[in-house]
Image (cartoon, rainbow, N blue to C red):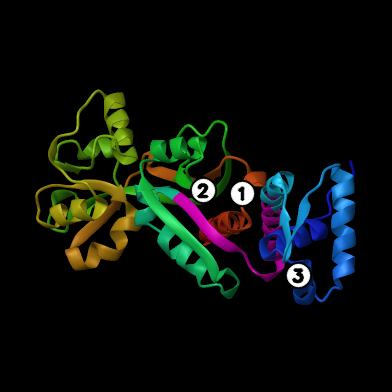
């Protein structure tokens, strides 16, 4: 059997829908005999009758109905190929589903996405951002429920492809009247004698702090647990304790809240984030453009 011709399939679907070769000829600026010749050749190639004449035109046979459904799928797929290829020169379109860790959402990710969407070439792209723990980001990527993920690169990323993204630096945040406020930097173990404000036990930061404390044989004394970095900073402002948060999160609020930010000297306090996906070849044009933009934003940030 010969390869199916997309132009002939498009004409066949149009004839089935309109029930008239003449009307399709007028719309396509073709003589009816040229369309009839194409359809006759299609029937010959497939070895079955596809159209039957009725009083005021034609209608598909049972085989023709089946071919019409298949043809619509093939024509739709061909159009998607064309659209994706066009996106490389005239801008992409579509929805990109991205899942990101709490820290990345609280830091620079929203600004980086906004910069991407402000590019006129990306006016037809929409980005849906969901905030989750790093482990849940990885699970969603493996399940295929999101296209892109941004998470801490210490998560189990086996089987995924990655681009480097940004870095952050964990710090002790205190009220400016706290005894630790005079320090310019501090080792985490030196904060254990003071009350801490913690985040949920399953969060990446809290898990890291628990492991660090266990390695010293000591425990962290928590006075309160809150659900977000901003809530932790508000509790610290009230003088109820100190908290460990990314320096990049605390800096915008430090002056207004009378807070001191004291970077941790521990090696683990410097964290790296990664842009993750299943396979670069399977990314849509829009998702690939966004991933490349985020990677470039990460490179710019590390260069400054």
Dot 2 alpha-carbon crowd within 10 angstroms: few under 14, some 14 to 19, many 20 or more: many
Asked whether, in this view, residue 80 is left or right of residue 135, the answer is right
Q: Which quadrant of the structure image shows residue 111? A: bottom left
Residue plotted at (20% across, 68% down)? 256
Locate residue 245, reporting x and y percent: 29, 49
Q: What label does residue 283 carry, if any?
A: 1
Pair 2/3: label in front: 3
Labels 2 and 1: the sequence-earlier one: 2
Residue of label 3: 24
Residue 278 on the magenta segment? no
Q: Is residue 228 visible?
A: yes
Which residue is at the front of the view, 256 or 133? 133
Q: Residue furthest front?
A: 55
Of 225 and 65, which appears nearest the observer?
65
- Label 2 and label 3: CA atoms lie apart by 44 Å
Question: Which quarter of the figure has residue 209?
Answer: top left
Could you give the CA–CA distance between mark 2 and mark 1, rounded to whole angstroms? 9 Å
Q: Earlier in the sequence, mark 2 or mark 3?
A: 3
Which residue does the numbered mark 2 point to in the structure image?
Answer: 148
Report x, y in % for residue 61: 72, 48
The residue lying toward the viewer, choosing from 69 and 243, is: 69
């Amino acid at each position: 059997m010969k390869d199916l011709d997309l132009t002939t399939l498009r004409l066949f679907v149009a004839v089935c829908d309109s029930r008239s070769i003449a009307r399709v000829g007028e719309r396509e600026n073709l003589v009816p005999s040229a369309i009839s010749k194409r359809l006759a050749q299609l029937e010959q190639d497939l070895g079955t009758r596809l159209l039957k004449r009725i009083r005021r035109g034609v209608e598909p046979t049972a085989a023709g109905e089946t071919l019409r459904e298949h043809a619509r799928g093939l024509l739709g797929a061909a159009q998607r190929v064309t659209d994706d290829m066009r996106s490389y020169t005239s801008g992409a379109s579509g929805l990109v589903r991205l899942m990101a860790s709490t820290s990345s959402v609280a830091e620079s990710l929203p600004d980086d996405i906004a910069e991407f969407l402000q590019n006129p070439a990306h006016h037809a792209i929409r980005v849906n951002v969901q905030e989750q723990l790093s482990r849940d980001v990885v699970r969603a990527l493996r399940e295929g429920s999101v296209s892109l993920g941004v998470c801490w690169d210490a998560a189990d990323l086996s089987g995924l492809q990655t681009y480097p993204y940004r870095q952050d630096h964990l710090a002790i945040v205190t009220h400016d009247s706290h005894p630790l406020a005079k320090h310019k930097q501090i080792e985490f173990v030196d904060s254990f004698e003071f009350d801490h404000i913690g985040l949920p036990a399953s969060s990446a930061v809290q898990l890291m702090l628990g492991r660090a404390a266990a390695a010293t044989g000591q425990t962290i004394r928590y006075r309160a647990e809150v659900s977000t970095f901003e809530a932790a900073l508000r509790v610290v402002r009230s003088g109820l304790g100190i908290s460990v948060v990314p320096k990049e999160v605390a800096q915008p609020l430090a002056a207004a809240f009378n807070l001191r930010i004291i970077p941790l000297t521990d090696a683990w306090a410097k964290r790296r984030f990664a842009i993750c996906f299943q396979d670069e070849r399977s990314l849509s044009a829009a998702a690939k453009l966004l991933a490349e933009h985020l990677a470039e934003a990460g490179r710019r940030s590390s260069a400054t």
